[in-house]
Amino acid sequence: MASLSGDVVVVTGAASGIGRAAALRLARAGWAVAAVDVDAAGLDGLAAEASGVRPFVCDVTDGEAVAAFALDVARELGPPRRLLHSAGVGVMGPLLDQDPADTLRVMDIVYGGTLRMVHALVPLMAARGGGEVVLLGSIGGWVPVPMGGGYGAAKAAVHFLAEIVTAEHRADGIRVLCVCPPAVETPMLDRIRIDSPQLLGPRPGLSIEAVLDSMDRALTRGRPWAFPGRGTRALWTARRLAPRTLSGIIARKLVGK
């Protein structure tokens, strides 16, 4: 994650989990980090730990706030070279047992938040001559998992967005990487274990460092996708080549059908 003379990176979801770890790694590598979250206390703790971090409290579901934030970053730190969008939320459970409003809220945070950040920051990157957009997808957005319908649909939309931005802004020097891990050991995963214990059982999630290492390798090699974790790419391949077989195996393992 080496920086070129203090280049600016925007990291969303920076108060905890993958976003926090990424912000620290980037700051220690010499980046000027614009750390974004709704958790002001979490951002203050992050900024106290790394001198290269500038906290910005912003709700990614608020379009006006995101647009204002983008202008503030450009004015205070300079136009960003990279966006690392990690902000998200997960609500698990049988899809039709959930209030549609809750499912749509997940879509607004996960996909809508991604769209708003990309919409606000990609023009600034293009104006500076190019940049990198790193989006957090999920293998759950490729492989339909029972009790993960709302979250998976939102991540699938993020994957589609990554491909569209790549196609439409390649000439602007914009590179897009979408990182699609399995379950990762984060505070969100801890909450899922409490709310839906049958979904994961005792299996540990992938480490955050493994996700960031995979991200770094993909950026270095200029790849559009990263599938961290053992077997993750194989799941993605199986979904493409044998979707019915894979869906049957997952259903039997998770819901006994």
Image: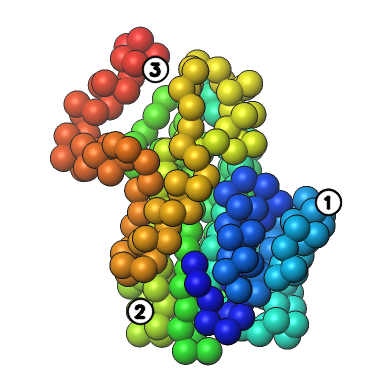
Q: Nearer the viewer, mark 1 or mark 3?
A: 1
Query: Could you tell me which residue is drawn at 63 percent across and 67 percent down?
Result: 27
| Pointer 2 or 1: first along the chain | 1
Contact (Cβ within 8 Å) of mark 1 with mark 3: no
Instruction: Determine which residue is flagged by label 1.
Output: 41
Left or right, residue 243 beside residue 76:
left
Q: Residues within 10 Å of mark 3 (few under 14, many from 20)?
A: some
Judge the density around disc 1: few (<14), some (14-19), many (≥20) Cα neighbours within 10 Å: few
Side of 132 where 248 appears, left or right? left
Circle 2 residue: 170
Where residue 137 appears, as percent x and y from the top left, is 45, 50
As displayed, is residue 190 above or below residue 207? above
Occupied quadrant, residue 219: bottom left
Q: Identify the residue at image location x=39%, y=14%.
A: 255
Which residue is most to the top? Answer: 256
Nearer the viewer's eye, disc 2 or disc 1? Answer: 1
Instruction: Write down the quadrant of residue 11 in the picture.
Output: bottom right
Q: How many marks?
A: 3
For label 3, the residue is: 254
Could you tell me which residue is drawn at 32 percent across and 38 percent down? 230
Look at label 1 and name its amino acid: Ala
The image shows residue 55 at horizontal and vertical percentages of 76, 65
Helix, strand or loop status at disc 2:
helix
